[in-house]
Image (tube, helix red, strand yellow):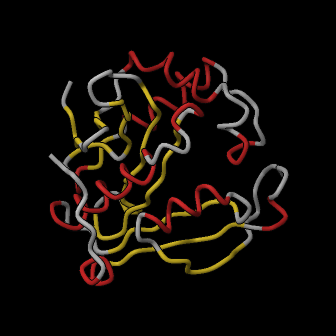
Amino acid sequence: MRNFLETDRLVLRAFTETDTDHLLALDGDPDVMRFVNGGRPTSREAIEAHTLPRLLHAYPCLGGRGYWAAEEKGAGTFLGWFEFRPLSERDPAVVELGYRLNKAAWGSGYATEGSRALIHKGFTDLGVERVTANTMAVNTRSRHVMEKAGLSFVRSFTGDWPEVIAGSEHGEVEYELTRPDWQRGRQEPAVQ
């Protein structure tokens, strides 16, 4: 299994079909899914038919996948995943950053560490010009990670979502980091 990226404490690797049970546990936690769908667990059928195929999707402009399984370095414990995928299939200039980690990993700095490492790789190796990230306005933990990773608030917006979940009445927020801004405030992560 090929590792995409390593930091001091994380390994980001390609997903495989064998990750179904990891994803089932992750998406089965109501706290993890709170800002995704209101806390409903995802079924095994949905993981196999929708989630895993999305996570296995390759983006030729990046030379690989856009979603990466996150494991604790050394122990190999599955922590969740990171998204770093282009908004256009053929152009790596603008990528979306995202993350979903299990509750046991919250508050340990893994989300910030993984995000910073992906941003660094994007700007130095992958031709990325702009990193964007979105979350619900009330998701203060995710917003804090975005800020610690170097992204800045751009705007608030509301979407026409198929279902209303608690807090969605406050809308969504968008953050971004451009290559010039990253170069000015560059923080080198421990990338191997």
Q: Nearer the viewer, residue 15 or 46?
A: 15
Q: Nearer the viewer, residue 72 or 131?
A: 72
Q: Judge from the rendering whether residue 177 lies leftward or rightward of residue 48; answer left or right.
A: left
Q: Judge from the rendering whether residue 180 lies leftward or rightward of residue 32; answer left or right.
A: left
Residue 56 placement (x, y as % from top left): 37, 34
- Is 87 drawn above or below residue 113 in the view shown? below
At a point 35% along the width and 73% down the height, the residue shown is: 130
Q: Nearer the viewer, residue 95 or 192?
A: 192
At a point 45% along the width and 38% down the height, the residue shown is: 54
The quarter of the picture where the N terminus appears is top left
Residue 187: quarter of image: bottom left
Residue 101 placement (x, y as % from top left): 52, 38
Residue 170 placement (x, y as % from top left): 80, 67
Tally of numbered tags: 0
Q: Nearer the viewer, residue 61 or 37?
A: 37
Residue 95 placement (x, y as % from top left): 38, 63
At a point 34% along the width and 23% down the height, the residue shown is: 16
Q: Judge from the rendering whether residue 73 lies leftward or rightward of residue 165; answer left or right.
A: left
At a point 42% along the width and 25% down the height, the residue shown is: 78
- Is 135 drawn above or below residue 157 in the view shown? above
